[in-house]
Image (cartoon, helix red, strand yellow):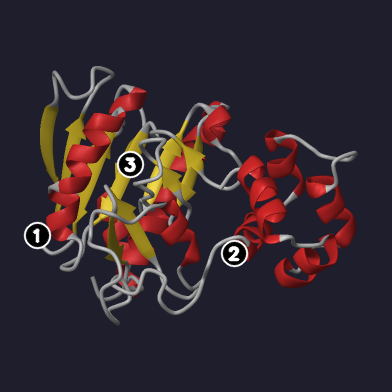
Amino acid sequence: MTITEMRELKEQKGYTLEEIAEKSGIDIELAAKIFYKKEQIGQKEFYDLLTYREIRELEKVFVKADKNKAAEALGAYQVKKQGEYTLEDYYALPDDQRYELIDGVLYDMAAPAVTHQEIAFEIAVALRKYIKDKGGKCKVFMSPVDVQLDKDDKTMVQPDVFLVCDQSKNTGRCIYGAPDMVIEVTSPSTRKRDFGKKLEKYVDAGVREYWIVDVKNQKVIVYDLGEDFGENMDLMIYGMDGEVPVGIYDGECKIDFAEIVNSVVNI
């Protein structure tokens, strides 16, 4: 939700600054900067001034977050059909529930297994170390950071690990647009989506490289998507007993999965 939309809703609902501050938990002086006409700030300053959690809490003030909201996704009863959900519904979901929104469909994201998280963390650490050693400008992120992949209101994903080189995509609230590289550590509940819908979405959005770490089969599937939206896509399959080169760094960066596997308990 943009700051302009919030201001319009404030007028429609007749909220006072005191009510907004009380409902969202933000300081009343900050609320004044956002909503008081003589003090109004722009979207960029809005993202700079507030933390991600403060933005989420502020958005909830202007979203009807009753029990009926997105009830289908929560398994209670049908309110909307899958395919009709938007970011408004996504932001109205409870904080303790994780979902991804893909083409208007809400997918329940169960808490990952410890092994899953360990592997994702070790991959992120290895990528970050390489970038830091080389003085690179790209940044590594891990779930649950939001990625507004298609720049619309129908899709918001949370890749396990991803790399962003254009820092203008970082709005402070989410990554707006396609990451350069995405890594998903697949599990039984996400396998079909990782190999199907997400591959399709990442190709269409312009992700340059996509890895699927298939722990069950001890494989790392690497899709080199290039910069032509998958027109000349290459597919490579590696075992998790050696190094896997990172294509966007011309193979100079390598992730040692043998080392990762040896460091992870109960793989």
Mark 3 Cα-neighbour bin, 10 Å: few <14, some 14–19, many ≥20: many
Circle 3 SS class: strand
Which label sits in the foreground, 1 or 2? Answer: 2
Q: Is residue 176 above or below residue 227?
A: below
Task: Say which residue appears at 30% left-offset and 31% top-offset.
Answer: 205
Cα distance in 3D space between marks 3 and 2: 29 Å
Amino acid type at image mark 1: Asn
Q: Earlier in the sequence, mark 1 or mark 3?
A: 3
What amino acid is found at the position of numbered circle 2 in the picture?
Lys
Q: Marks 1 and 3: CB-CB under 8 Å? A: no
Residue 47: give its label.
Answer: none
Residue 47 at x, y = what percent?
68, 43
What residue lies at 34% left-to-right and 74% top-to-bottom?
Answer: 71
Single out the mark in the foreground, 3 or 2: 2
The percent coordinates of residue 6 (x first, y second) are 65, 50
For the residues labelled 1 and 2, the Cα–Cα distance comes to 42 Å
Looking at the rendered structure, the kind of residue marked 3 is Val
Q: Is residue 35 left or right of residue 244?
A: right
* Tag nearer the camera, 1 or 3: 3
Q: Is residue 191 visible?
A: yes
Mark 2 residue element: helix
Between 31 and 146, the residue placed more toward the observer is 31
For mark 1, give the secondary structure. Answer: loop
Q: Earlier in the sequence, mark 3 or mark 2?
A: 2
Q: Which mark is residue 182?
A: 3
* In this rendering, position of residue 48 left or right of residue 166: right
Location of residue 158 in the rendering, given as x and y in whole percent from the top left corner: 39, 53
Asked if disc 1 and disc 2 are in contact, CB closer than 8 Å, the reply is no
Q: Residues within 10 Å of mark 1 (few under 14, many from 20)?
A: few
**Label 2 sits on residue:** 60
Instruction: Identify the residue under disc 1.
Output: 217
